[in-house]
Image (cartoon, helix red, strand yellow):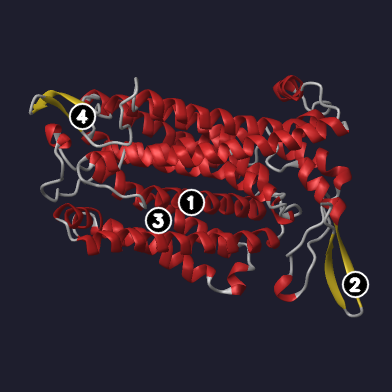
Amino acid sequence: MAATEPKGHGQHAGMWVFPDASVMTADMGEKTNVMPRPFTIGLAMAGILFILGIVGFVARAANDGFSEIGPWGYYMAIFSMVFMVTSGAPLAAVAFRFTKSHWRRPLSRVAELFSIVGILNLLMFIPLMFVLPDIANPGEVAEGELAVRRTIWFEGPIGAPHAWDLVGVAFLTITSMAILWISVIPDMAECRFTATGFRRTIYSKLSGGWFGTKRQWNSQKAGLALLGAFYFMTLIFMHFVISSDYAQSLIPGWKDSIFPVIYTITSLQMSLGTILVVMFIMRRWGGYEGYIGKSMFWSASKVLLGITLLWVYHLFAFFITFWYGRLEIEQNIIKYLVTDTYAIIFLLNLIFSFAAPFAVLLWNPVRRSAWGPALAGVLVLFGGLMFNIRIFVGAANATPGADLYKPIMERVPAPVYPDIFDVFMVIGGLGAAAFIYLLATRVLPIISLWEVKEGTLYQKWGKLIRGEYLILGKPE
């Protein structure tokens, strides 16, 4: 066994676990090598969805091409959702390391592995470069000057916005992959002598000359800190860029400094929710109960509850600003995105991004369980999907052709419903992300060995009079 029985009694039963560091490497290597039947079925289903997504993309490209952005609204929505989840997830590992949270140790590698799915983000973004309209409209001249649409690129630098957006997404992917590599080096170095086949080759090449010296550990710690800070800055900037270029700039007259913040908060909410879902699956069906105690869900649920409250606060701030402004364009935007055209989608977004997860996480007994926070994670994921459909399908179909370059949106457009190819692309995007992530878990350990082993040195189960308590040391 890789771990002792979970400790605790009553409502705290299974709250804390104490892995056995002496057998952890062998146990994790065995779990990485085997492919149990549920995993195989999940991988096959994700692969089928992935193929359907490719079929939908090819059919959409063949029928509509890349000259107009309207037909690609649902593709934009699923790109944004995958981007929000996979870009925000590595930040969880970075942030909780900064705060030196002990409970986050089993969570770190689960979050970092989403960096590999970042490659999918980069590939999915390339078609969006071709459908995004230019800042200037070469076919329209107003008072002797070229008509332009409002964007964040005031001076229109060379390649803006397409090339700069691509560079930003690429930098985000490279930085997250670098964080994953630096974090996983100690584990690969330890496993390279027991692994076989292609894993041994990969571990030997990527672990380099790691032997666990004090200097190497200090260098790793400094590298994770520096890359983590750079990743955080890049992430916030790219959320601002994507939400501005592919949402606000496509609806004439939409000027809002709060929306990019809502976009980032939604990303963090969905990312943490996804991590909790993955952790629950690992604990319940993956055989990792000896590594993942309920304390991880209990602690993370408090963070998720705080993010959920932040989400509804900024949504209120967005709405009340436009509600009291009462300009024609502000009323049209509210009607379009909130109260009229996409009212049902907005209602679902509000319920699943705030009301339902808030109701779940409000209760201490639910937060202390493993299933409660995971259920909230499922809810916020669906709410995030509704958010992206509402915003990006609406933005792509707000104004056709030359109307995009007018100062304001003069009418409230009708909703755009998905066809079969849109459905294929949406479920295919989700399937592609799941497929790549599942494959990544067959190459790299899904639990950070060095962090969990480090944690075993700082904790023990002790007794005082009649009570039993977790004794936790603080090294720093």
Q: Are marks 4 and 1 in contact (CB under 8 Å)?
A: no
In-image side of 443 versus 311 (left or right): right
Residue annotated with mark 4: 68
Callout 3: helix, strand or loop?
helix
**Location of mark 1 (residue):** 270
In the figure, residue 346 lies in which quadrant?
bottom left
First of labels 4, 2 by sequence position: 4
Mark seen at residue 383: 3
Residue shown at 70% from the left, 49% from the top = 106
Residue 463 badge = 2
Q: Is residue 338 above or below residue 53?
A: below
Q: Earlier in the sequence, mark 4 or mark 1?
A: 4
Report the Cα–Cα distance between label 2 and label 3. Answer: 44 Å
Kindly identify the amino acid type of the residue bearing the numbered disc 4: Glu
Cα–Cα span, label 4 and label 2: 68 Å
| Separation of marks 1 and 2 at Cα, in angstroms | 39 Å
